[in-house]
Image (spheres, helix red, strand yellow):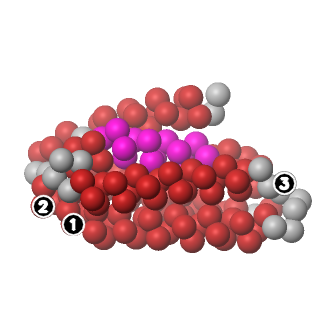
Amino acid sequence: MALILELIRDDHDLIRALFDELKSNPETRDVRCITLRRELSGHMYAEEATLYTHLRDAVPGEVQRSLDEHAGIRETLAKFEKISLRDDTWLPALDDLRRQIEIHFAREEGEVFARTKEHIDRGDLFALSEPFEREKVAAARTISA
Ligand SMILES: [Fe+2]
Ligand SMILES: [Fe+2]
């Protein structure tokens, strides 16, 4: 099993690839939108239940900023999902959602990962991997229902 930080980065890359697919392949957009909701919501939930729960005491400001960004992304995602695939505003809304998510991912892979390595030792980073995957699966089950 990998370090939780590697799993988080893999998720980010998978979500980035989903955005590329959503943009370039109109035929599969309906299915990919369902995948995006499951992957993105499950990812954020699992981060909150594992990494951010462990970091909260050490760097409360940093953690709160991430939770606020998650709330903003959830809000934008909910608005985006109300737009019909045939609507002219769908593609610009997809770009806006991606921009917001990329800013968040960049901050996590930069500042948050750096703070994590300062405050959580390698053994604990390994130990958090399994709960991270488990929380993601549990969240996906309720999200896709
Ligand atoms: Fe996040
Ligand atoms: Fe993330």
Specify few, some or many for label 3: CA neighbours under 10 Å numbering under 14, 14-19, or 20 or more: few
- Is 46 in the magenta? yes
Task: Tell me the element at label 1.
Answer: helix
Amino acid on which the number 3 mark rests in the picture: Ser
Q: Compared to 82, does 141 lie above or below?
A: above
Q: Compared to 108, does 142 lie above or below?
A: above
Residue matched to label 3:
84
Is the Cβ of the residue at disc 1 closer than 8 Å to that at disc 2? yes
Q: Compared to 7, does 25 lie above or below?
A: below
Residue 118: give its label. 2
Specify few, some or many for label 2: CA neighbours under 10 Å numbering under 14, 14-19, or 20 or more: few
Amino acid on which the number 2 mark rests in the picture: Glu
Q: In the image, is 128 to the left or to the right of 9?
A: left
- Is 103 in the magenta? no
Magenta range is: 37-51
Residue matched to label 1:
114
